[in-house]
Image (cartoon, rainbow, N blue to C red):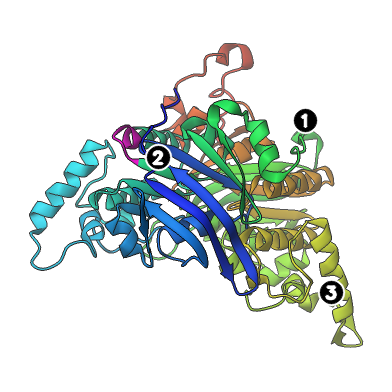
Amino acid sequence: MERKQNAQPPVVEIDHVSKRFAKVLANHEVSITLHRGEVVALLGENGAGKSTIMNILYGIYHMTSGEIRVDGVKQNITTPRDAMALGISMIQQHFSLVGAHTVTENIILGNVRGKIDYAAEEKKVQELSDRYQFGVDAKAKVGDLPVGMQQKVEIMKALYRNTRILIMDEPTAVLMPQEIDTLMEFIRSFVAQGNSVFFITHKMREVMQVADRIVIMRNGEVSGTVSKAEVQMADLARLMIGHDLEVLSRSEHDEKKEAVRLKVDHVTVERKNELPLLKDLNFEIHAGEIMGVAGVSGNGQDSLCELLYGALTPTSGTITLDGKDITHLNVAQHIALGVGYCASDRHRYGMVADMSLSENMMLKSSYLHRWDKGGWISWKSVDRYTRDKISQYSIKAPDAGVTIGSLSGGNQQKAVVAREVDMGQNFVIFDQPTRGLDLGAINYVHKTILGEREAGKSILLVSTELSEVFTLSDRIAVICEGKFMGIFRNGELTTEQIGMLMAGVPIEELPERENNAEEGGAADGLKGGQT
């Protein structure tokens, strides 16, 4: 049910605010209002200025021009501490928690001075957790908590400061389905108490689920503001990117008719005196097949990708690619065999920020003599290749010579995807390929992945976004604590069932779907384990 709009003046008024970074105009004449007891969602493509305007409100950036009023009073917010004093808090995409400290220590850090009655503070934090039914133990070490619980700790930090205006930047990016539902319930409860929320997301379903008003941003400007009751999801997508999204279709795939390209045979990866990173993995990927891997972040997905790319060596078991044993080959040898890897952390593994686009595009193939011309690098060829990729992937870059670090995150990711798709002539690993991308870019990357599937490549797709796994995968493996809970064909399990497997519930204990009898029991298709 949509909440009634408050007739009182806005609690926040962002009035014709502009922000310029050197030659880049990030925000231009942005005006947004937020009322008491309201959720306002901000939608827009990468680089549209959503996070920038919220960072200005939170005091991380300083506006170039314009005015911000809180409760009708003009405010000069120059630091986050200024914002907090006004009751404004921001939950960033990347948490600012200290893993070695307890929940209580993280929450009181910077908020309590002088002699601390730690027992009293711990009791206060636990009461806060209980009040919102977060289920967070105030004594637990943050580093031991799953990512969903860590997000709740971030929210509790804001609540501890008596926040009344909460900014949430892509808050569901690392959550599994049940945790997203819990977060939505919290937001409803929070605004029902007269508080207000700015909600930045690219997920249409979440916007329709929780927002009262929706602000659409394009090229640093507000291009429209609509009530949730006035629009459908398709309308929002069109308003956001300026045109209809291409409808993607995935043809049926019978893996039994296709040759096995990748085979992982009872592979375990463990280190001395540590729990195994991966436990007895046993699966195959056929030519022209996408195998999705669903799981909560930190359950072995990165280790699996590194294993298949040669960065990790199995403790036991074997891996073959097109019948060739690649178990002990290094990364360079995997690249030479036509394996591409789009890593989840592009800044650490996918690019060198201070190098140009052209240099980044040829980094992995520099030793393969692809760009040799008499023993020298043919930069004309590299630049021509890079310009082709800029055009093909709609990368917003003035030329091939700009540093990749100067591009927005979404455009950096497009460049990495373009290179890895080209490098992976036989097998491509996609680890969170659309994290942080807007709808248009996501649609394009999905189209690219499906196109590579149709070209006969084998693809491993790792994603914490179940909608992405369902959209693209032929078969889906659910991973929990380094072990596959089962592998099944797309459509055999519901979102709820997959979410429970992600949480470690054995398949035998899953509730049956209502139409199991008609479609064939999901459990029956899985009792054989990994296939």
**Which corner quadrant holds the C terminus?**
top right
Q: How many marks?
A: 3
Dot 1: element: loop
Q: Mark 2 or mark 3, which is nearer the start of the sequence?
A: 2
Which residue reaches farthest right? 374
Image quadrant of residue 121?
Answer: bottom left
Q: Which residue is mark 2?
A: 35
* Nearer the camera: disc 2 or disc 1: 2
Dot 3: element: helix
Image quadrant of residue 400?
Answer: bottom right
Q: Looking at the rendered structure, which numbered label has been put on residue 383?
A: 3
* Nearer the camera: disc 3 or disc 1: 3
- Magenta highlight range: 189-195
In the drawing, does residue 208 fall left or right of residue 75?
right
In the drawing, does residue 401 fall left or right of residue 122?
right
Classify 499 as above or below 122: above
Classify 46 as above or below 195: below
The amino acid beneath tag 1 is Glu
| Distance CA(mark 3)–CA(mark 1) | 38 Å
The amino acid beneath tag 3 is Asp
The amino acid beneath tag 2 is His
Q: Residue at x 84, y 67 (%)?
A: 387
Q: Mark 1 or mark 3, which is nearer the start of the sequence?
A: 1
Image quadrant of residue 216?
Answer: top right
In the drawing, does residue 188 fall left or right of residue 420?
left
Dot 2: element: loop
Q: Which residue is mark 1?
A: 252
| Distance CA(mark 3)–CA(mark 2) | 50 Å
